Image: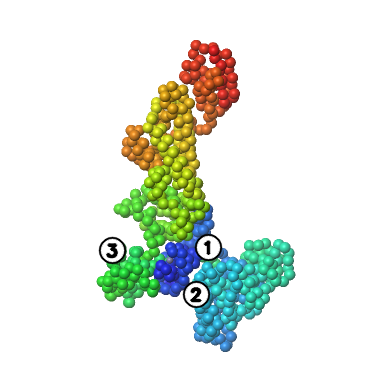
Amino acid sequence: KKSLLNWCPSCKTVLADEQAEAGVCERCKTVTEKKETFQWFFKITDYAQRLLDNLDKINWPEKIKIAQRNWIGRKEGINITYRVKVPNSLKVRNLLTSVTVFTTAPVNFGATFIVIGPEHELARKAAKTDIKVKEYIEKALKKSDIDRIAEGKEKTGVFTGLYAINHVTKKEIPIYVTDFVLGHVGTGAVQGCPGHDKRDFEFAKKFKLPIPRVIVGKDGDDSPIERIEQVVEHGMEGQFVNSEFLNGLDFEEGLQKTMDYFEEKDWGRRVITYRLRDWCISRQRYWGPPIPMIECKKCGWQPVDEKDLPVKLPYVKNFKPTGDGKSPLEKAAKSWLDTKCPKCGGKAKRETDVSDTFLDSAWYYLRYPSVNSNVEITKKWLPVDAYIGGAEHAVLHLLYSRFVWMALQDWGYLDKSLGEEPFPFLYGHGLIIKDGAKMSKSKGNIVNPDEYIDKYGADALRLYLMFIGPYDQGGDFRDTGMKGMKRFLNRVWKLVNKPISEVKEVHRLRHKTIKKLTELMSNFRFNVGIATLMEYVNGLSRHNAEDPRRKSSGEKWGADKESLRVLILLLAPFAPYTSEELWLKLGGKFSVHQQAWPKFEERLATTGFTTVVVQINGKLRAKLELDRKAAQDKAKVLVLAKANNHIKTYIKDKKIVKEIFVPGRLVSLVVK
Ligand SMILES: [Zn+2]
Ligand SMILES: [Zn+2]
């Protein structure tokens, strides 16, 4: 369809609304212009409500859900059609005799003017007989949408010379053209109720239009509205006044009653509107899939036959965008451009625009499992279990993908059993910054990973990136942090290279660590996961350092094979290279990355245990891991302490002269 579109003068192509969100090109940040051209669209608007409703069913960051909700922009309101009174002096052929406005807050006893966008048909027609209107429209259309709707700037407009009749006050109200109404959004016209809308108030002040009060707010002020602070807007508390049959009603109740009344009188119809517009997929670039459409003079636009798909990108010498609004493919060979009409077989020409790359990325995840069109494989792998992405794609890729998935499903290309959403779980990652700022070439605070890989190794860098902060928040990159990771890996390396025999007492630590890490990994808490692994390594080392048998054998530290095996398995996702090497050293089969995640026993992993130290003549000789409750029981703990194999060697053939017990913490035996 023909439409007013965002044009990036630098990329020399039209862009979708989502790619020119703030009036700047998503790719190169150039301020976009408006251009009216013929383009291909996908009717994403048909899915607006489903895209909105399903947001409640998916596990996504709230921030991204809010962005999509706002972008879809559902509004409940009413379309009110005004009769336009055309003065004889302005009678021109085909001049509209009505104008429809959309409003969510019809305080119509307070409507004193109508504003229409410069794109509005009525504005264009008024421009034909009025040079001032014409000039205003020309100027307004040069501005970006974002400038036009920006708050706080002085309101501008021009009177069209036309009046509409207010249904309830029967007064003639003037119609203005203004740039802050976007003619291509909604009905492109708005009724001005200056007493109860700040923007309307500013406009009315500027053009000296009446500002009647029809709502009294919470403060009870019923004086004439002269200052902007007196404006009681929709959403605030208030009661109707000066509105005949509505007087005394609450704000919201009165609005509903007005809508009922207008519908009854056939002056208006309740409508649900969406901010979301159709998705423009045409691009005037070379690189992209040619849009498979053919134009026949006789039959009009025809889709390329399915058997002739895909339409391959033809070779062209100059593939740079031309800037004249035409695709570089216009310069393709005649043999490619000219084709036969799929319907009548007559001469026809190919579409030369290509589709946007965002269309490809909206379904790539479907392609991975469907290479051989194997439905079972697709069913096995989809929908995506966990999708990781940045918030910058909130209304681009993440919205398009949901739409394409739904559409394909509706057409029967995707099994219904896969569910209505491609990414039921989405996790937004944070940003790693440097010196407190986002990395950018111009700021010179770029971190080049290669340098760090050369100096510390890829695993240390990888570990550090995960350790730097919570995954959904990111953190500040510091060189000192890198060194810590290198030291940690060195420690693991040394530990694994010297396995010692099984030591029973570390079971609990091991099971606890597996349990904790399993939970942390499934919640993307990688930084805490690494800290947990560090604690584990500390625990293994400390335990053995304090074990007198190790001391006597000259081994300062070490860990048993099973504990190390688990360590490597847990470390593998964080430090894949180091863990692979260590895995092979321990005699594991290639590859560590093909092993199952270690299991834990709940009984051993629960934290309902405490450590009771056992001293003999004031020296630490053993540690007992006991149930918290049991650790309070003096008799029980003493029996267990004396039964400990290690303690036995110290009390053998000796006489216990004193027993000291600190519940839950300590047993101290004095022997002779
Ligand atoms: Zn651009
Ligand atoms: Zn034809």
Q: Which label lies toward us, 1 or 3? A: 1
Amino acid found under the numbered disc labelled 2? Lys
- Does residue 111 appear to the left or right of 282 in the view shown? right
Circle 3 Cα neighbour tier, 10 Å, few/some/many (<14 / 14–19 / ≥20) = few
Instruction: Kindly report the distance in space between the C-alpha atoms of the residues bearing marks 1 and 3.
Output: 40 Å
Residue name at image x 41 percent, y 67 percent: 11
Q: Which label lies toward us, 1 or 2? A: 2
- Does residue 300 appear to the left or right of 171 in the view shown? left
Q: Identify the disc placed on residue 73.
A: 1
629 vs 392, nearest the viewer: 392
Instruction: Kindly report the distance in space between the C-alpha atoms of the residues bearing marks 1 and 2.
Output: 25 Å
Q: Earlier in the sequence, mark 1 or mark 2?
A: 1
Q: Earlier in the sequence, mark 2 or mark 3?
A: 2
Amino acid found under the numbered disc labelled 3? Lys
Q: Identify the disc placed on residue 307.
A: 3
Amino acid found under the numbered disc labelled 1? Gly
Q: Identify the disc placed on residue 507.
A: none
Classify the position of the C terminus by image quarter. Answer: top right
Q: How is the image coloured?
A: rainbow
Point out residue 209 in the picture as x, y percentages from the top left corner. Answer: 65, 77
597 vs 26, nearest the viewer: 26
Query: Which image quadrant for residue 41?
Result: bottom left
- Judged from this view, the residue extending furthest toward the bottom is 89
SS category of the residue bearing label 2: helix
The residue that label 2 is drawn on is 142
SS category of the residue bearing label 1: loop
Residue name at image x 50 percent, y 49 percent: 475
